Image (cartoon, helix red, strand yellow):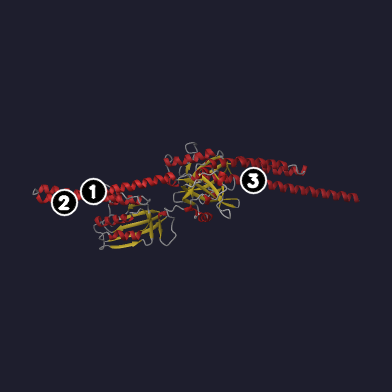
Amino acid sequence: MQHMTNTTSSRTVSIILVLLMLVFSIGVVWSIVTETQGVLKDSVQDELMSVAGAAASQIDGDAFVGIQTGNEDTTEFLAIRDQLRGVKEAVPDILYIYTMRNNDGLMEFVVDGDYGYADDASLIGDTYPEAEPEMYLGFEGPSADEEFTTDQWGTVLSGFAPIHDGAGNVVGIVGVDMDSTVVRNEIDYLNTIFYLIVFAVMITGAGGFFVVERRRAIAEKKIEESEKKYRQLFEQAGDCILIFEAEGDDAGRIVAANKAAATMHGYTTDELLSMKVSDLDAPESRAAVPERLHRVLNGEEIRGEVMHVRKDGTTFPLEINGRLFCVGQKKQVLAIDREISDRKHAEKILSLAAKKQNLLNLITFSDIKNAMFSLLGYIELEKEVMTDEQGLAFLEKEVDLIHQVEQWIRFARQYQDLGVVPPTWQNVHNAYLYALSHLDAMHLKRSAEVEGLEVYADSLLETVLYALLQNSLEHGESVTEIALTCQETDDGLTLVFEDNGVGIPFDMKGAVFDRKHEKKRGMGLFLVKEILEITGIRIGETGVPGEGARFEMHIPRNHYRFAGSKGEPDPSDDGI
């Protein structure tokens, strides 16, 4: 009886030990498989976001915005496609790479990297069915699908990153579909091993642990290969790429730098890794580093120009593009920078050439004006001695022609200043009042509902308003009222100047801005159109003939603001 009790007790202990071993082994195996799956997926997601971000940073956002349906063979479209193809060739695991934009909630293709290389490539405007939430998140920052997607094209995981225009606005996304079949099969295989191990443990104990560890080593090798591909893309980039800490005592400490960054600054890569990013800033821009870090921690993308200093003490201008990204719990900054010394030098030379050209024009205009003044004097003397009526008529025509030449010269002197002075924020109401002060408009009823409106425009904005006012006074015939108003629209603001005169016939609405249309007064409306187009402002005449002229000036969203409010970002702001 005692023996039976001991046997039962031993059997119970053995069963308990086996069960404990089983539970422990299952727990260990389950933990290892889950961790491996997570590491594999995180690795692919990180690589996707890095590749998409690197591709997006190379795309000219302003050229991207201009691509419309049917533009597949344009220079802008082909340039972006070739950039996408270059990324795809650098990372063989990429199945598809493309750009998209959000058209009222519908995702549509813009540039497909396979256009011209594959028959099933998407065209501009093709819609993407059933877009995932991660695709929409790509407009806010780098994102990646949480789960693998299997369809007729294979098993893929997609990543997205925003495309920005010159003003920093998000105008589209880059999408990257990576071939994840191998990784997915590995995860499925690990799940199968899990169940096999549970069965094997019940028979042989803990014999399956070695198998799982071996599979984990294989998975780590695949991760290492993926990281190697990422490092190759990182190192071979022609632009300077720096990764540095975003917060804490180590804020600004460089944790990664590519060869281009080392070469550009005259340091070795190891030397850069022992420095902070503020060590690379020239003294005049070093004080702004804490503010940049603060802004990037708030989710703001940093764009602009700064001065950096090389190891030998020489300084050079740099165009920077920095954004926040997280590695686990750590917040770091990815900065992709480009040296712009040649561009700055060219801009300086062009500016100097323009100033010299303007000086030459000023001297020439002055000499011509003096000569015409003398010529008019001689013609007046000739009138006094000439008695022939036909000869006097010829002299009158000569005087008219000289006055016409004077007006052409006056126009040329105005036109030569276009674009020479950089555009600035200007108060529209003040410019309107200054323009009125140069004209005899006291007999007109005037109104201006543009209080506080500021427009980013060429310095000749006052000339624009003056020309519109002068056009009403000279050609409106029955004008008794003029008005300047504004109205915000979905894509900007419309500034309206109108009068209650005879208006402009329908067949002349386009011609009024033609240089050949203007006669006695030079080229007023032609000049208006040219001045406004410098900063992307479009003008058109939409009035009703017989009821008055109406000139509508459409101002892009980031080119206007209202004083006293935060408004839109300054197009001339270089960021940092």
Q: SS of the residue at dot 1? A: helix
> What residue sits 37% from the left and 45% below the top?
349
Q: Amino acid at mark 1?
A: Asp
Which numbered disc, 3 or 1, marks the residue that appears first in the sequence?
3
Q: Which labelled disc corresponds to residue 37?
A: 3
Which quadrant of the structure image shows residue 454? bottom left
Q: Which residue is mark 1?
A: 367
Query: In this rendering, would 33 be left or right of 277?
Result: right
Q: Position of residue 272 (x, y in %)?
A: 55, 46
Q: Amino acid at mark 2?
A: Gly
Q: SS of the residue at dot 3? A: helix
Task: State the residue lying farthest toward the front.
Answer: 312
Task: State the residue lying farthest toward the right.
Answer: 1
Which numbered disc, 3 or 2, marks the residue that appears first in the sequence?
3
Dot 1 crowding, Cα within 10 Å, few <14, some 14–19, many 20+: few
Mark 2–mark 1 Cα distance, whole angstroms, equals 15 Å
Q: Which residue is mark 2?
A: 377
Query: In this rendering, would 421 be left or right of 139?
Result: left
